[in-house]
Image (cartoon, rainbow, N blue to C red):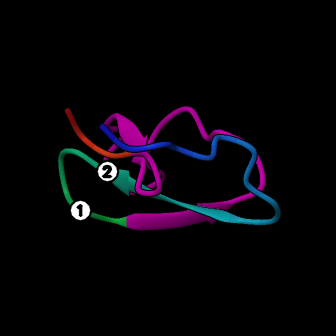
Amino acid sequence: MIDVDLAHEGESPYECFECGTVVLSDGAPDRCPNCDGDLRNRRTPLE
């Protein structure tokens, strides 16, 4: 088990599950600007 710091300062990278585009954003973007796919925060580990 690892500790995850969820209070990130500044821009975070979000990666599209569909096309792999990486978007930098201060907030949580809804959809990928290229293909409208779902995004995940790359700083949050996949389970």
Label 2 CA crowd tier, 10 Å (few <14, some 14–19, many 20+): many
> Residue under circle 1?
20
- Viewer-closest of 44 and 14: 44
Label 1 CA crowd tier, 10 Å (few <14, some 14–19, many 20+): some
Which SS class for mark 2?
Answer: strand
> Residue under circle 2?
16
In reply to whether residue 30 is colored magenta, the answer given is yes
Residue shown at the point (48%, 52%) measured from the top left: 33
Residue shown at the point (56%, 32%) measured from the top left: 30
Q: Which circle marks residue 6 in the picture?
A: none
Residue 39: image x %, image y %?
40, 41
Q: Quadrant of the N terminus?
A: top left
Q: CA distance from mark 1 to mark 2?
A: 5 Å
Q: Are marks 1 and 2 in contact (CB under 8 Å)?
A: yes
| Most distant residue in the front direction | 1
Residue 15: image x %, image y %?
36, 56
Q: Is residue 33 above or below residue 13?
A: above
Q: Is residue 12 above or below residue 45?
A: below
The overriding secondary structure of the stretch rendered in magenta is loop
Amino acid found under the numbered disc labelled 2: Cys
Q: Is residue 5 above or below residue 14?
A: above
Residue shown at the point (65%, 39%) measured from the top left: 28
- Viewer-closest of 2 and 33: 2
Question: Which portion, as a residue range, is magenta?
Answer: 22-44
Residue shown at the point (81%, 65%) measured from the top left: 10
Residue 35: image x %, image y %?
31, 48
Which SS class for mark 1?
Answer: loop
- Viewer-closest of 35 and 40: 40
